[in-house]
Amino acid sequence: MKTIRIANGQGFWGDWLDAPIQLVERGPIDYLTLDYLAEITMSIVQKQKSRDPNAGYARDFLYVVGRVLPKCLDNNIKIVANAGGVNPQACVAGLAEVVKKLGLAGKVKVGVVAGDDIMDKLDELIARGIELTNMDTGEPLSTIRNQVTSANVYFGAAPIAEALGQGAQIVVTGRCTDTGLALAPMIHEFGWKLDDWDKIATGTIAGHIIECGAQTTGGNCQVDWQTIPDFWDIGYPIVEASEDGSFVVTKHGGTGGRITVAGVTEQLMYEMGDPKNYITPDGVADFTSIRLEQAGANRVRVSGVKGAAATDQYKVSISFSDGFKAAGGLIYAWPDAYAKAKAADAMLRRRLENLGLKFDEVLSQFIGVNATHEGLGGAPSPDVAEVMLRVGVRSNDKASVERFTKELAPLALAGPPTVTGFGGGRPKVEEVVAYWPALIPKSAVAPKVEVISV
């Protein structure tokens, strides 16, 4: 029975740069997937593109390809990444430069999955009665239409599999599902039908387990985290997928970390939602059907996954401008650190009020005193060594936010004693880019697949 090894070397843009290199160099794999995009990442890359038309994608991807491509070509390892962000074409142009510097120009086939960007179609869609209603609030997109900065459809595995079928050695996508990166190679290699719902669900679960990288191999793991071996050299996850739909989660031998049923279970719970209806554009997976079994050291077998038919809609990730924000902090030392931080906060708020500034929200945190578990109650110890007062403001009135940035620093000399650090320097005004989740009929949009030589 045919088996392929799919490894994921990035769980987000900013993940460990050496992880993909480790996966390629320290053992056999057939596919290297790189998952760069989250909702907040889409907002970041959109900001970048608005400042530079040649930006808007995960630039780390070019570094990774530059390090691993020769060995990937020698060993027939294919790369699948959603590094395209909001500008897949610019990403591919950068990739072409990397290939050229490696002396491989014209020898690499790159698949580009685009069509997810529907920014220029929004007015047409709204006119057709497709309201792109906010999934959380029920409001139609028309209420904030003039503030929209990006709109991208989540495509699934099918267009990636199509690119692989056309001979692509590297596939670059824009917005697609995290799970689709791993499911697509299975569809391509095993010839799975797109309506074989149990197998589609199985591949989706495999993709979900490895999409966050080392979060499956012991990273960010609550269970016995102190005993995880060689944490500094943690291995990244590999799925050994078989044609019948079964798979094993593992990692390269000789790497740190640990793969156990408990650790895989923690990752399965991540962003799960309704456990019986985990919806992707490819199909619906029933998490309650999953069976996990420890099948040896650092090997977890997954079986029994049941699926259901895909829906007739795609999810859309929309970002929009929603005012301005700024945040900054001061660190207060013992004695009475918490009392000093509270007093400084009260002073600052009184001054902002006297200035008549307009804020939608003023948020104060006392880091070191239950900032993570706010509202649990209980008086802080009077002997707490240090507390950071962190204050953030948000407003549609940019002038108010700009004035706030000048009011924090004076407290260092004109406020409570023992300020030991001006956390981050003077606050900077930033545009608030908010998230608007919506649904769109699949009939209203289609992915575009192109395979080119670079």
Image (tube, rainbow, N blue to C red):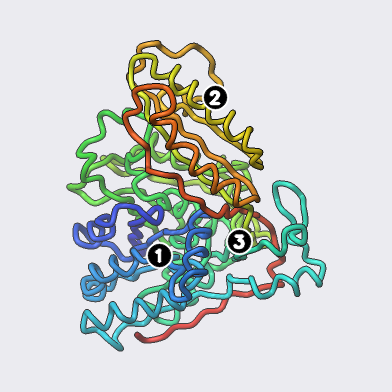
Q: In this view, does 151 lie above or below 407?
A: below
| Residue at x 42% of width, y 44% of height | 426
Which label's residue is closer to the chain start, 3 or 1?
1
In the picture as drawn, the residue positioned furthest to the bottom comes out as: 106
Q: Which amino acid does label 2 sit on?
A: Ala
Q: Is residue 352 above or below residue 123?
A: above
- Could you tell me how far apart the alpha carbons at marks 3 and 1 are, in whole angstroms? 23 Å
Q: What residue type is labelled 1?
A: Ala
Residue 88 placed where, x, y %? 47, 74
Q: Is residue 390 visible?
A: yes
Under circle 3, the secondary element is: loop
**Residue 280 occupies quadrant:** bottom right
- Is mark 2 in CB contact (under 8 Å) with mark 1? no
On the image, numbered disc 3 is attached to which residue? 281
Which label's residue is closer to the chain start, 2 or 1?
1
Under circle 2, the secondary element is: helix
| Residue at x 36% of width, y 36% of height | 422
In the image, 310 versus 92, the foreground residue is 92
Residue 138 placed where, x, y %? 77, 50
On the image, numbered disc 1 is attached to which residue? 58
Under circle 1, the secondary element is: loop
Quadrant where the image shows the N terminus: bottom left
